[in-house]
Amino acid sequence: MNNLRHGEIKVFYETGKLKYMGQYRFNLKEGLWKYFNKRKLSIIKNATK
């Protein structure tokens, strides 16, 4: 696992269409990626595929 603290990440729909692209921050507690957009905060596990 890489110890990057911030950078770029892509989030995809199940259909494979691009949902969101932007910055991420690494949460050291659980290894979660936190995605910020205009509407809400989404937390996704195992985003590093």
Image (cartoon, grey):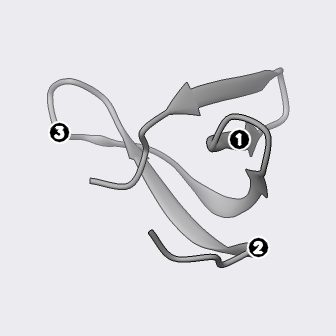
Image location (x, y in percent) of residue 21: 55, 58
Q: Nearer the viewer, mark 1 or mark 2?
A: 2
| Residue positioned 51% across, 76% down in the render | 2
Q: Residues within 10 Å of mark 3 (few under 14, many from 20)?
A: few
Q: Is residue 4 above or below residue 37?
A: below
- In the image, taking residue 6 as reference, residue 10 lies left or right, namely left
Q: Residue 35 is drawn in which quadrant?
A: top right
- The amino acid beneath tag 2 is Arg
Tag 1 secondary structure: strand
| Residue positioned 73% across, 40% down in the render | 34
| Residue positioned 30% across, 29% down in the render | 13
View extreme (left): residue: 15
Tag 2 secondary structure: loop
| Residue positioned 44% across, 68% down in the render | 1
- The amino acid beneath tag 1 is Tyr
- In the image, taking residue 14 as reference, residue 41 lies left or right, namely right
Q: Earlier in the sequence, mark 3 or mark 1?
A: 3
Q: CA distance from mark 3 to mark 1?
A: 18 Å
Q: Earlier in the sequence, mark 1 or mark 2?
A: 2
Question: Residue 16 versus residue 32: which sits nearer the camera?
Answer: 32
Residue at the disc numbered 3: 16
Mark 3 near mark 1, Cβ–Cβ under 8 Å? no
Image location (x, y in percent) of residue 12: 34, 40
Q: CA distance from mark 3 to mark 2?
A: 26 Å
Residue at the disc numbered 2: 5
- In the image, taking residue 41 as reference, residue 46 lies left or right, namely left
Image location (x, y in percent) of residue 20: 53, 46
- The amino acid beneath tag 3 is Gly
Q: Residue 47 is drawn in which quadrant?
A: top left
Q: Residues within 10 Å of mark 2 (few under 14, many from 20)?
A: few
Question: Residue 37 versus residue 2: which sits nearer the camera?
Answer: 2
Residue at the disc numbered 1: 35
